[in-house]
Image (cartoon, grey):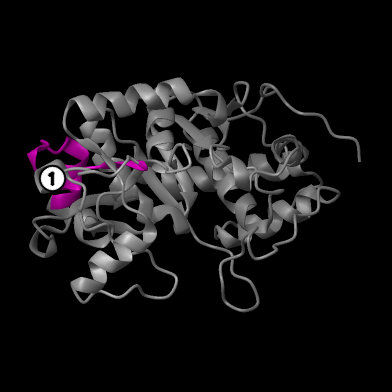
Amino acid sequence: MSLSVPTAAPATAAAAPTAGGYVGRFAPSPTGPLHAGSLVAALASWLDARAHGGQWLVRIEDVDVPRCVPGADALILQQLAACGLHPDAPPAWQSRRGGRYQAALDQLLAAGRAYPCGCSRKDIEAAQAARGVVRQRGAELPYPGTCRPEHGGLGNRAARAWRFHTGIFESFEPPALVQQARAAIDSEVNSHATPWHDRRLGAQQQDVAQVVGDFVLRRADGLWAYQLAVVVDDADQGVTHVVRGEDLADNTPRQILLQRALDLPTPTYLHTPLVLAADGQKLSKQNGAAPFDVADPLGALQQAAQVLSLPPARAASAAQALQGWIADWQHRWRAEQA
């Protein structure tokens, strides 16, 4: 099957543009081709944009260069095109935006909301072990704040990474969206937690300082961390709605803290159900998930739609199926979001 990389969307029958200026995005990492699980997120984000009469963008999140597979970005764009999921503007690549991330880090450093860190993983494990904290399998230890300025800073050590200072988040004035989320879980909210609302999961909260600690903004290997890059990119692209897999929901509180620290708007979030492998684990490229079959885009989309609780499409083509699902998505989600 001959495929070409899309640059912009063809004419699509979708809802009339909303006054709010909806902008959504799909942001895959080019660590391999898209599989059935990633197609669910792609389809959901595309449908949400079309149902709201908004823009749908594609961003290649390739800041973690060692994990990126050469040519995977082009293959991902080909897979999307085969399914009729065309972006409304040329795709963006994170690896070309280092200057913007540096500017954001400089802003945080100048405001005292970030600091250099000289700790290695072993240093963090030792510090937490001294407190009786042991790393759980598959989990990262929260950073204990060893290199915080108020704790003496780097001392004689060289800077390895740069971290966000979660200890100062209480000085931020929560925006209206966070206030609404706090009201929704009023009696149960932790006074130190960051509350937020997910369109599917409902009211959420996380004490970032306790669960994660001061998280990394720039890594010891010089690469930009996902949290900073995605926040800067969403703001620069004018993203108003983030629709992505539920495995990324845990990142949302950290991103909200960064948005508040950088005085950036907070998008509306919807996290989609995960596709599980036969062993019950999340389907992922790291676990060897096979790419979906571009020779049968309608079949691949039908499977993704089923995960999203959309009805089977009685259509002869992927394009026809997509048009039918736009109306189904509008009925389910647009009234809730408006």
The residue singled out by tag 1 in the image is 152
Nearer to the camera, 52 or 88: 88
User: Residue at 28% across / 57% down in the picture?
Assistant: 212
| Quadrant where the image shows the N terminus | top right
* Relative image position of residue 24 (x, y in whole percent): 48, 33
On screen, residue 98 versus residue 278, left or right, reads: left
Nearer to the camera, 54 or 228: 228
On screen, residue 255 versus residue 70, left or right, reads: left
* Relative image position of residue 299 (x, y in whole percent): 77, 55
Is residue 177 highlighted in magenta? Answer: yes
Query: Which quarter of the figure has residue 61?
Result: top right
User: Residue at 56% across / 72% down in the picture?
Assistant: 281
Q: Is residue 213 above or below residue 60?
A: below
Tell me the magenta residue range. Answer: 160-182
Nearer to the camera, 205 or 165: 165
- Judging from the image, what secondary structure is the residue with disc 1 in? loop
Q: Is residue 190 above or below residue 68?
A: below
* Relative image position of residue 87 (x, y in whole percent): 62, 28
Near mark 1 (Cα within 10 A), the count class, few <14, some 14-19 or many ≥20, is few
Is residue 186 highlighted in magenta? Answer: no
User: Residue at 44% across / 20% down in the picture?
Assistant: 99
| Quadrant where the image shows the C terminus | top left
Q: Is residue 154 above or below residue 15?
A: below
* Relative image position of residue 286 (x, y in whole percent): 63, 60
Residue 322 in view here: yes
Residue 312 in view here: no
The amino acid beneath tag 1 is Gly
On screen, residue 216 versus residue 113, left or right, reads: right
On screen, residue 320 versus residue 63, left or right, reads: right
